[in-house]
Amino acid sequence: MFSKATEYAIRATIYIAQKGNIDNKIGINEISTSIDSPQHFTAKILQILSKKNQIISSTRGPNGGFYMSSKALKLPVRAILKAMNEDTVLEKCVIGLNKCSEIKPCPLHKQYKLIKLQLIQLFENKSIEELAEEMKDGKLYITNKK
Amino acid sequence: MFSKATEYAIRATIYIAQKGNIDNKIGINEISTSIDSPQHFTAKILQILSKKNQIISSTRGPNGGFYMSSKALKLPVRAILKAMNEDTVLEKCVIGLNKCSEIKPCPLHKQYKLIKLQLIQLFENKSIEELAEEMKDGKLYITNKK
DNA sequence: ACAATTATGGATATATTTGTCTTTTATTAT
DNA sequence: ATAATAAAAGACAAATATATCCATAATTGT
């Protein structure tokens, strides 16, 4: 459904949201090992998320690392998709027609439209913060370890 | 959601199902221009669908081309996904965790599970034949042209 | 000031996907 | 038989995605 880059982006962001804050920044090493992703590749992704798109924040030097502002925590997961330029998955025709629409629907359009709507809601409804919050009882995971 | 190859595979198959039959085989040129896909690349995809996976049939030479057997027409669209090795989209974790499950769910698992179920139904419920049939009144399209 | 730390940035490498082009093989009609 | 037709097959090219490595810049603590 999504590229590896976007998968890592979502995993990393949720991890940072759950484990980090301004007083406890998380290093790229911890992040990448925790979410099971290649370190340097993940670092670049976090740059994307922090650079133009203000989803995560970072500082360098000792005790530096990644964290999220309380404002960013309010963002929906969809903001990550947008930052990664993969929001189109929630919009485009399932068989790749660029003219597919209500007027010229593809054979799967009618049914898929309803699914897309739910996908949009899934990524729109809950904030990153809420997801991270739900994880705190230890019943949800973003790790492949153990 | 799917690779270009799979998008082309679905479009081509539905096109062949609708326009072709054993007495009226469709050439790769007509197919690729009709569904708006690169000709030779599409040809390779049709080979995949005809080789091991008996989804489409073909014959060479004059009046040759592609068509579908009445048996193949009964297959669901999901058979195309399987042939293209993209059936995993309907199974894997939305954020790419390979350990994501009911026991160790990711933060999006519960909601996404329901969506995956509908995706499976979408690609499982209707046969390629039925889709092609629905197109015959000219209210559904798999072309980008005009 | 200096050394240690940690993200940033750039260069490069590898793999995969997508796309094109040419030759070969099978089939048909003449 | 021969020529025309059309898919099959193989080689190659381009684009994109994924991944690694190294140097640089910023920050902190001493």
Image (spheres, coloured by chain):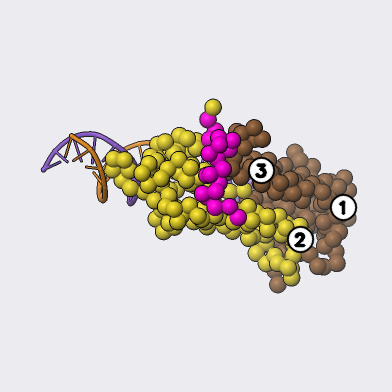
Chain colours: A brown, B yellow, C orange, D purple
Q: Is residue B21 left or right of residue B10?
A: left
User: Is residue B134 part of the magenta span, yes or no?
Assistant: yes
Q: Is residue B116 left or right of residue A60?
A: left
Could you say which is closer to the camera, residue A68 or residue C9? A68
Ranked by sequence position, the earlier of labels 1 and 3 is 1
The disc labelled 3 sits on which kind of residue?
Lys
User: Is residue B24 part of the magenta span, yes or no?
Assistant: no
Measured from the top left, where is residue B68 in percent x and y? 43, 49
Question: In the image, what residue occupies the spot 59% across and 35% down?
Answer: B139
The chain containing the residue under callout 3 comes to A
Residue A110 numbered tag? 3
User: What residue sits right under mark 2 in the picture?
Assistant: B110
The disc labelled 1 sits on which kind of residue?
Ile
Measured from the top left, where is residue B38 in percent x and y? 46, 38
Q: Is residue C15 left or right of residue B26?
A: right
- The segment highlighted magenta reads B125-145
The chain containing the residue under callout 1 comes to A
User: What residue sits right under mark 1 in the picture?
Assistant: A22
Question: In the image, what residue occupies the spot 88% across and 48% down?
Answer: A70
Q: For the residues tagged 1 and 2, is the chain the same? A: no
Q: Secondary structure at mark 3?
A: helix
Label 1, label 2: how far apart the Cα atoms are: 30 Å
Residue A39 numbered tag? none
The disc labelled 2 sits on which kind of residue?
Lys
